[in-house]
Image: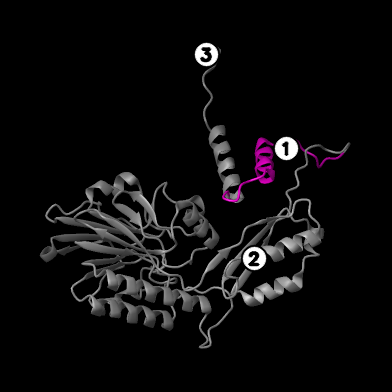
């Protein structure tokens, strides 16, 4: 019994102001094309079961174009795999805020797809000796997450957060209604747990995974790219799981548009001409170029007076060539370590100020992301500050 797991399609996602010749937002068209490529991979895998773990659309009221594309591609998949069981659950982006409002996902039931979008439902397929517990991301009570003892294969499909497993910036930026502990999840009891909501492919247990999104559609695109890089992932994709052997495969899906996070530039101690030269070398030296790509370049420790003298003509040209060119300029952090005589503005730096300043100024290797280093350093400091002091009797012993 082979299963394919995908999630977080976010069809209808829009970003930037570029339009296709047909008048569609370019990023919406990119995400649609990526989904087409993902369906190609699903069809090629020819699984017995396909599960979509939520967020089919980016908004609860998607555009007609997004609905038509989803219907056409899911229809193509069900026609190519007539014997496959297909299950779709609703994610937080698919779920209306009002209980009286209906969602669009039930449209796909016409294709023979099992859609679960209002409340959790156990789907039984006795001819396959399979049970699927589908849990959409909707507010309110949910059933006990227990397998069906009568079925040989038990699959849990859930869109939500597994407590403690998502980076803080993800949970804050895009809160799921369903939050579940590792204990309640009980991954070991299931043949497979297919999770949706987190956009980076991640193992929660040996048989429980977030498949990740199909394209870069989260509020923190560059954070996603960084997480994939440090995890050794090739990018976005779909999961194939053999429920008999436990064999697990991550199949990358080609991106419709490349994202390029250029090596950051440190402007500490440099003049405008030197910064402009480094900017030019960084952009022009990027293998494959920046044309029609989504690009970010971070310049750190750039004072205002130097920023004013950047080569803005060259920057405008980069913005014209790329689909989007983001120049992320970061000022030097001013840390007042000593008050001037009689000045009320001075203060002694706190330990947090001191640690942040040291981490932002120290020399790093090319594989170390300074933002992540600073964030982790300050997080460890907070943890240390929260450790209770030992009783005085023990300290004196």
Q: Is residue 249 magenta?
A: no
Q: Nearer the viewer, mark 3 or mark 2?
A: 2
Q: Magenta region: which residues? A: 343-368
Q: Is residue 362 magenta?
A: yes
Label 1: how many Cα within 10 Å (few below 14, some 14–19, many 20+): some
Quarter holding the N terminus is bottom left
**What is the spatial separation of the Cα atoms under label 1 and label 3, in whole angstroms?**
32 Å
Position of 138 relative to 348 (above/below):
below
**Badge 1 is on which residue?**
349
Residue 334 visible to the viewer = yes
| Residue bearing mark 2 | 285
In this view, the residue in front, 68 or 297, is 297
Q: Is residue 270 left or right of residue 91?
A: right
- Mark 2 neighbour class, 10 Å CA radius: few under 14, some 14 to 19, many 20 or more: few
Q: Are marks 1 and 3 in contact (CB under 8 Å)?
A: no
Instruction: State the SS at label 2.
Output: loop
Q: Which residue is mark 3?
A: 393
Residue 119 percent across, percent down from the top left: 29, 63
Say what secondary structure mark 1 lies in. Answer: loop
Front residue (pair 252, 392): 252
> Mark 1 vs mark 3: which is more N-terminal?
1
Q: Nearer the viewer, mark 1 or mark 2?
A: 2
Other-residue count near label 3 (Cα within 10 Å), few / some / many at <14 / 14–19 / ≥20: few
| Circle 3 SS class | helix
Identity of the residue drawn at 22% across and 48% down = 189
Q: Earlier in the sequence, mark 3 or mark 2?
A: 2
Q: Tell me which residue sits at (56%, 50%) in the image.
A: 367
**173 sits to left or right of 125:** right
Relative placement, left or right, of 165 versus 156 is: right
Q: Which residue of the protein is positioned furthest toward the bottom in this rendering?
A: 22
């Amino acid at each position: 019994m082979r299963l394919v797991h995908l999630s977080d399609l976010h069809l209808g996602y829009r970003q930037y102001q570029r339009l296709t010749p047909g008048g569609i937002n370019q990023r919406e068209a990119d995400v649609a094309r990526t989904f087409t490529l993902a369906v190609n991979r699903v069809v090629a895998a020819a699984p017995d079961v396909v599960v979509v773990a939520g967020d089919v659309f980016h908004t609860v009221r998607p555009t007609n174009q997004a609905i038509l594309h989803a219907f056409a591609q899911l229809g193509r998949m069900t026609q190519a795999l007539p014997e496959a069981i297909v299950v779709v659950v609703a994610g937080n982006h698919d779920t209306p805020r009002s209980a009286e409002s209906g969602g669009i996902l039930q449209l796909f039931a016409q294709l023979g797809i099992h859609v679960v979008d209002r409340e959790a439902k156990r789907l039984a397929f006795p001819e396959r000796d399979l049970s699927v517990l589908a849990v959409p991301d909707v507010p309110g009570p949910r059933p006990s997450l227990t397998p069906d003892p009568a079925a040989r294969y038990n699959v849990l499909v859930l869109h939500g957060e597994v407590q403690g497993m998502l980076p803080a910036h993800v949970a804050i930026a895009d809160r799921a209604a369903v939050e579940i502990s590792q204990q309640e999840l009980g991954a070991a009891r299931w043949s497979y747990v297919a999770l949706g909501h987190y956009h980076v492919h991640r193992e929660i247990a040996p048989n429980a995974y977030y498949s990740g999104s199909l394209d870069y559609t989260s509020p923190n695109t560059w954070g996603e790219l960084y997480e994939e890089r440090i995890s050794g992932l090739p990018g976005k994709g779909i999961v194939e799981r053999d429920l008999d052997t436990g064999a697990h495969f991550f199949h990358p899906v080609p991106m419709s548009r490349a994202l390029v996070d250029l090596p950051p530039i440190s402007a500490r101690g440099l003049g405008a001409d030197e910064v402009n030269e480094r900017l030019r070398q960084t952009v022009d030296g990027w293998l494959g170029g920046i044309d029609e790509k989504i690009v970010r370049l971070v310049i750190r420790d750039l004072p205002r007076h130097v920023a004013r003298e950047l080569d803005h003509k060259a920057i405008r040209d980069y913005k014209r060539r790329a689909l989007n060119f983001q120049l992320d300029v970061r000022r030097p952090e001013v840390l007042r370590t000593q008050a001037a005589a009689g000045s009320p503005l001075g203060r002694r730096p706190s330990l947090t100020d001191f640690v942040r300043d040291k981490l932002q100024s120290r020399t790093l290797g090319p594989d170390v992301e300074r933002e992540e280093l600073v964030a982790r350093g300050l997080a460890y400091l907070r943890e240390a500050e929260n450790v209770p002091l030992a009783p005085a009797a023990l300290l004196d012993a």
